[in-house]
Image: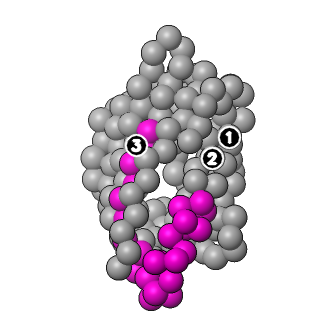
Amino acid sequence: MARYEFLTTWLLRAPRAAVWDAIQDVGQWPQWWRGVESVAELDGGDGDRVGSRYRVRWRSFVPYAIEFVFEVEHVALPETMSGRATGDLEGTGAWRLVEREGITAVSYDWRVDTTKRWMNAVAPVARPVFGFNHDWVMRRGGEGLAELLGVELVAGS
């Protein structure tokens, strides 16, 4: 398996509660996040969504699809949400939201291994392409979230 670690940050001129509501509503991501093809809720989890499971299918700039199940393992409203992915990618992801002076900083820490044989075989030379694809999808997420909320995306990486 090939290991990838990404840290994405979005700065939105929006209250944290509004940003949190959009991010934790995973089933609606395809409506505003370009690159998310589909989301199927497999389990709703508890009242804070701990234990919830989603099958998510992504398609990035380079036309190949990635699908995995993500299970929410930890939630601290409205600051952090983290969990584990299994499928085409396996590993962990963690959202963190901090608000200061009307701007919410959203960070996403994604640490995964690829499980597709072809991705592992080409990883030594394709790593920059896979990184570009991740960055492309995450930029679309920040832009889509800002549009959904009707706010300014101050910065996104």
User: Which residue is denoted by mark 3 in the rendering?
Assistant: 95
Residue 156 visible in the snapshot = yes
x 34%, y 38%: residue: 80
Q: Secondary structure at mark 2?
A: helix
C-alpha separation, residue under disc 3 versus residue under disc 1 = 17 Å
Is the residue marked by circle 3 packed among few (<14), some (14-19), or many (20+) residues within 10 Å? many
Looking at the rendered structure, the number of numbered marks drawn on it comes to: 3
User: Which quadrant is the C terminus positioned in?
Assistant: top right
Check whether the beta carbons of the residues at disc 3 and disc 2 lie within 8 A of each other: no
Is the residue marked by circle 1 packed among few (<14), some (14-19), or many (20+) residues within 10 Å? many
C-alpha separation, residue under disc 3 versus residue under disc 2 = 15 Å
From the image, give the main secondary structure of the stretch colored magenta: helix
Q: Quadrant of residue 52?
A: bottom left
x 46%, y 78%: residue: 124
Q: Amino acid at mark 3?
A: Trp
Dot 3 or dot 2: first in sequence order is 3
Residue 47 visible in the snapshot = no
Q: Position of residue 31 (x, y in %)?
A: 69, 51
Whether residue 128 is situated above or below residue 99 in the rendered picture: below
User: Which residue is denoted by mark 1 in the rendering?
Assistant: 143
Q: Quadrant of residue 5?
A: bottom left
Q: Secondary structure at mark 1?
A: helix
**Front in this rendered view, residue 51 or 67:** 67
x 38%, y 75%: residue: 2
Q: Quadrant of residue 144?
A: top right
Position of 137 compared to 107: left or right? right
Q: Which residues are magenta?
A: 107-133
C-alpha separation, residue under disc 2 versus residue under disc 1 = 6 Å
Is the residue marked by circle 2 packed among few (<14), some (14-19), or many (20+) residues within 10 Å? many
Whether residue 153 is situated above or below residue 144 in the rendered picture: above
Q: Amino acid at mark 2?
A: Arg
User: Which residue is denoted by mark 2 in the rendering?
Assistant: 139
